[in-house]
Amino acid sequence: MRRTVAALLRKELLVELRTLESVPGMSLFALTTFVVFHFALNQNSVSGDEAAGILWVTLLFAAMLGVNRLFVADADQGGFDAFLLAPVDRSAMLLAKALALLAYLLVLELVAVPAFALLLLGPSLGQALPDLLVVLALADLGVAVIGTLVAALAVRTRARDLLGPLLALPLLMPVVIGAARATSPLLGLVHAEHSPARWLLTLGLYDLVFGLIAYAVFDFLLED
Amino acid sequence: MIELEGLVRRYGEREALSDVSLSLPAGGTLVVFGPNGAGKTTLLRVLSTLLRPHSGEVTVLDRRLPQDAWAVRGRVGLLGHEPLLYRELTARENLRFHARLHGVGEERVEELLAAVALSDRADEPLKTLSRGMVQRAAVARATLHDPELLLLDEPRANLDPAASELIEPLIGASARRTRVISSHDPSGGLSEADLVLGLRAGRPALLREADRVDPGEIAELYR
């Protein structure tokens, strides 16, 4: 299994490096959205709930671009068929795709979070960063698992570009709510010591539940 | 090796394969003729485990499908209209990727690159290669894991005579594998066949040993 996941992940990252179809688009979308918010809100800076909301909604929509592209090369170039003909555990593809999406999200956030701090955020990010990293990690895990599941379902339909976001956004609402609530106190004018534990716990539980669901149903999604 | 009894496969309401029954022993070659849309590709995909039969009994490599599909995967090599290779990756990267999926050593990759005369162009992205070269890479991919059963969908469609000769040891009769080949070429197909299946609108219109088939009967399928 580990060998198969490594082979799939390596291929995934290699294809992305050659095509640059996902990560640059995701990052550029996030930067553009922050600029739009900067001018649309007509404020020099935001904090608290407003800042957390802008950050997470932007990251969510940027992530959707990556989710929509996640299986396109496999569907269009026969990678699905080739994988299905191999004598390997099909869950390896779930794991490899989720890890690839996780890597894309990490790169996105390396660009988007500093840009957000520069363009919109009032309070300094320095103090909040360690706790924010925990929230980002938990939310990214949820987005990666749910995004992979939805992308695998949508890519085999004719309306895949529409179906992906339509399925993913409602399923990812709890992730965005949990992440925004956990982030809000960190980005307040008076910096909180820690994120509220209950929201971190909610995010962790949601990740776990969807991880198990994805593992249970992924095989059936790949079947004819 | 392959036993079909009343195989039916539908796409929605339409039957792409209706009541197909045949028997092919190990080492034999079945050549399937028929106009576009007759069900040739669907038959190959059912035999490869990629499509489920909707009714009838299907036994491939002595295993029942779809129940035992897991035991058939990895023992079948499929060469379809699509090369099942990533255009952005090189031929070597593609074959190494498939070698890892099939648990095959990298020396086999180099052996096959040499066999299809792609060693010199193996590090160029597939999208920069000609269709014939991509088809040769696809042949290497389909035979990488030394499959017992080869499913070949018009395997020489993009190849010039020299390239066809090059891949002969891998997918030709000399490869000594059980083969199911879809073809539009009556004389070429008949010369390879032990058993001939002619399909028309998903139904068997001809099923006979190759030495008892007249090329005119195959031409009749296309009228």
Image (spheres, coloured by chain):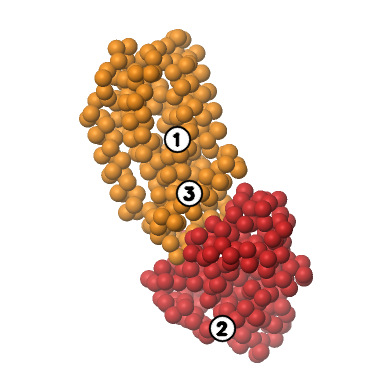
- Give the x, y percent position of residue A210: 31, 44
Q: Residue tagged by mark 2?
A: B27
**Residue at the left extreme?**
A198
Question: Considering only vertical position in the picture, is B149 above or below A84?
Answer: below
Identify the subunit bearing mark 1.
A
Tell me the CA gap for discs 1 and 3: 15 Å
**Residue for point 38% across, 71% down:** B67
Q: Secondary structure at mark 1?
A: helix
Q: Residue tagged by mark 1?
A: A105
- Residues at circles 1 and 3 in contact by the CB criterion of under 8 Å: no
Q: Chain B in the picture: what colour?
A: red
Any idea which chain is the orange one in this picture? A
- Camera-side mark, 2 or 1: 1
Q: Secondary structure at mark 3?
A: helix
**Residue at the front extreme?**
B107
- Camera-side mark, 1 or 3: 3
- Residues at circles 2 and 1 in contact by the CB criterion of under 8 Å: no
- Camera-side mark, 3 or 2: 3
Identify the subunit bearing mark 2.
B
- The quadrant of the rendering that contains the C terminus of chain B is bottom right
Residue B63's disc is: none
| Left or right: B223 as drawn, with respect to B93 | right
Q: How many residues crowd mark 1 within 10 Å: few (<14), some (14–19), many (20+)?
A: many
Tell me the CA gap for discs 3 and 2: 37 Å
Question: Considering only vertical position in the picture, is A158 above or below A31?
Answer: below
Three-letter amino acid code at disc 3? Answer: Leu
Q: Residue tagged by mark 3?
A: A9
**Residue at the bottom extreme?**
B212
